[in-house]
Image (tube, helix red, strand yellow):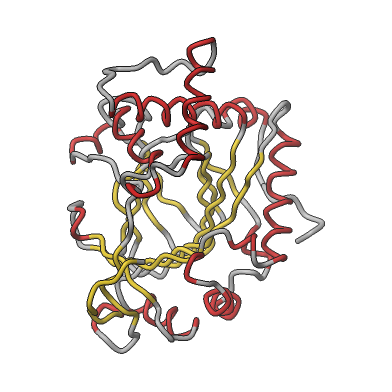
Amino acid sequence: MNSQPIFKDWEPQHTALFGRHTIRLQHALAESGLFTDEALAGLIDRADAANYNIATMGADHRRSNWRSGDKGDRSGAEVIDAVRNGRIWINLQRVNTFEPRYAALLDRIFAEIEGRVPGLETYKQTLGVLISSPNAQVFYHCDVPGQMLWQIRGRKKVYVYPPSEPFLNPADMEGVILGLTEEEVPYEPWFDEHAEVYDLEPGQMLHWPLNGPHRVVNHDCLNVSVTTEHWTNEIRASYAMNYANGILRQIGVGNPSRAISGPGFYGKAALAAAVKYSGVMDKRRYRRVADFLVDPKAPGGFVDIQTRMN
């Protein structure tokens, strides 16, 4: 794979669309050999608790239906068995930080993208791996950095919504950035009438505009996907603006400007940096509570346990 391009069908229009509109492209990640069951089990075995999330979910978007869990002493192979036969979602985060082969793949991905998009400079890139059960879903949410979703195995339906009101309220985005909530934002079923809907097949990548709300529903098959995140100076400026606006809103400033340039913005960037690095918001950050343990022999692939902070 090292001698072959990552993207198989990148055309000039994709250069113009990247970062501004949703694009779907063919990719060659599955040909790397890094996403077999054996490779994935090894990743799970080597990941520490800070580098994975495990969840189960109900059929609707009530927050109480999204529950966090832990793998305990289960092996990676056992976890994959539980995912294959249960209703579990596992997110292996920042795999590039502890697995050199995946770090090299990430470098190749962004070297190729930057080579195809003149002027694009990315940093703080990360690569994650999602392994999820047949018919599992990820509820309506938005992400902070730039995002790409790469399908490796299985099929899923992805709904992408406009990153603007009423689909994304600025105050909700600010709450995500401040860490007061996870990534979930309010959802109404009628939003679907305005969504872009994609059946993502193996070998396809989807990239959408910054902070675009989205949700995912697996088809009736095990799914393996890769997520990549990246930052640019423009994304960092948007982050600083939202962070500062969230602080200002909490002290009674209504509808603060969303400009990401000019003297007002630079004052906000300084405020965001001062508050963020003071640690004052850390005590208010949302914390996951693990209330189940992976068990490949149990219905749904897990058993309930007493809650503990994750």
The residue positioned 22% from the left and 40% from the top of the image is 187
Position of residue 99 relative to residue 190, above or below, is: below
Which quadrant of the figure has residue 135? bottom left
- Find residue 138 and report its horizontal and vertical position in percent: 33, 55
Instruction: Indicate the quadrant containing the N terminus: top left, top right, bottom left or bottom right.
Output: bottom right
Instruction: Indicate the quadrant containing the C terminus: top left, top right, bottom left or bottom right.
Output: bottom left
The residue positioned 72% from the left and 65% from the top of the image is 100
Left or right: where 275 falls relative to 247: right
Position of residue 167 relative to residue 221, above or below, is: above
The residue positioned 72% from the left and 34% from the top of the image is 116
- Find residue 131 and report its horizontal and vertical position in percent: 45, 67
- Find residue 209 and report its horizontal and vertical position in percent: 48, 32
Question: Of 153 and 112, which appears nearest the observer?
Answer: 112
Left or right: where 218 falls relative to 105: left
Question: Of 4 and 187, which appears nearest the observer?
Answer: 187
**Residue that protrudes farthest toward the bottom in the picture:** 297
- Find residue 225 and report its horizontal and vertical position in percent: 50, 60
The residue positioned 36% from the left and 52% from the top of the image is 157
**Residue that protrudes farthest toward the top in the picture:** 263
**Residue that protrudes farthest toward the right in the picture:** 3
Question: Of 187 and 18, which appears nearest the observer?
Answer: 187
